[in-house]
Image: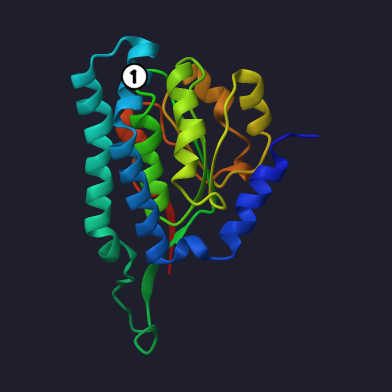
Amino acid sequence: MNPYVGLVSSLRAAWLTGKTRAAEHRVSQLEALRRFLDEKKQPILDAMASDMRKPSFEVELSEIIMVKNEVNYALNNLSSWMKDKGVDKNLVTQLDTAFIRKEPYGVVLIIGPWNYPLQLILVPLVGAIVAGNCVIIKPSEICSSSEKLLAETLPSYLDKDCFAAVTGGPAEMTQLLENKFDYIFFTGTTQVTYTVQPPPTHVHCLPSPRGSSSASGPCWAAGV
């Protein structure tokens, strides 16, 4: 039996309760993520130094500050993003109420690369939280210290019913991808993308592996 079936099912059950749709829940999780960055700054610096000998100033600029900026931007704009958007009516729909309402996808998976092990996990996480999704993060096993930090520490800051972390290498990834995800964030090589890309019934959209910009932003479906 697939070892991740229960985990994915529990997150989907939590999402179906609707708790992640509330603005208060989204705000609380964004604020919790910001606390993680503030309170675990030194462990983050130590993990990056251990994994890649990345200088502290570079980690602060390219990993910590960049993610905090995303969090702050999301908090400042969340209320406007969540509002329904009115649409023009035609002759047939003049008496109707027509608008676009943004809906979360559901349970999403974030697969992180090794070169920016914090930024390319947490920036997509901001977007997933903003949009009201439940999330599983899969940090890169190549950066073992960063992987351990994210897997063991970050979940204690977030709602455990709605967020989880999975560790491991290709074997674990293969098993994880056998489960149904509604959206997958992935930044990496084209070769790995073919491995990550699940059958069409398992995913709505897979961002192209062209860098950090492809892995950011709220993931939600829009419908009238």
Q: Is residue 109 visible?
A: yes
**Residue plotted at (48% across, 60% down):** 20
Q: Is residue 189 visible?
A: no
Q: Is residue 112 above or below residue 217?
A: above
Label total for image: 1
Q: Position of residue 178 (x, y in %)?
A: 68, 34
**Residue plotted at (43% across, 54% down):** 220
Q: Quadrant of the C terminus?
A: bottom left
Q: Position of residue 73 (x, y in %)?
A: 22, 50
- Within 10 Å of disc 1 (Cα), the crowding (few <14, some 14-19, many 20+) is some
**Residue plotted at (42% across, 18% down):** 114
Q: Quadrant of the N terminus?
A: top right
Task: Pick the residue in front: 36 or 11.
Answer: 36
Task: Pick the residue in front: 91 or 96.
Answer: 96
Q: Position of residue 33 (x, y in %)?
A: 36, 45
Q: Is residue 96 above or below residue 28?
A: below
Please tell me in which quadrant of the rendered image residue 62 appears. Answer: top left
Task: Pick the residue in front: 211 or 9.
Answer: 9
Say left or right for 207 vs 181: left
Say left or right for 186 vs 33: right
Image colouring: rainbow
**Residue plotted at (39% across, 86% down):** 96
Name the element at disc 1: helix
Residue under pointer 1: 46
Q: Is residue 34 above or below residue 212?
A: below
Q: Position of residue 38 (x, y in %)?
A: 28, 39
The single residue placed furthest to the bottom in the displayed view is: 95
In the rendered structure, which amino acid carries the disc numbered 1?
A: Asp
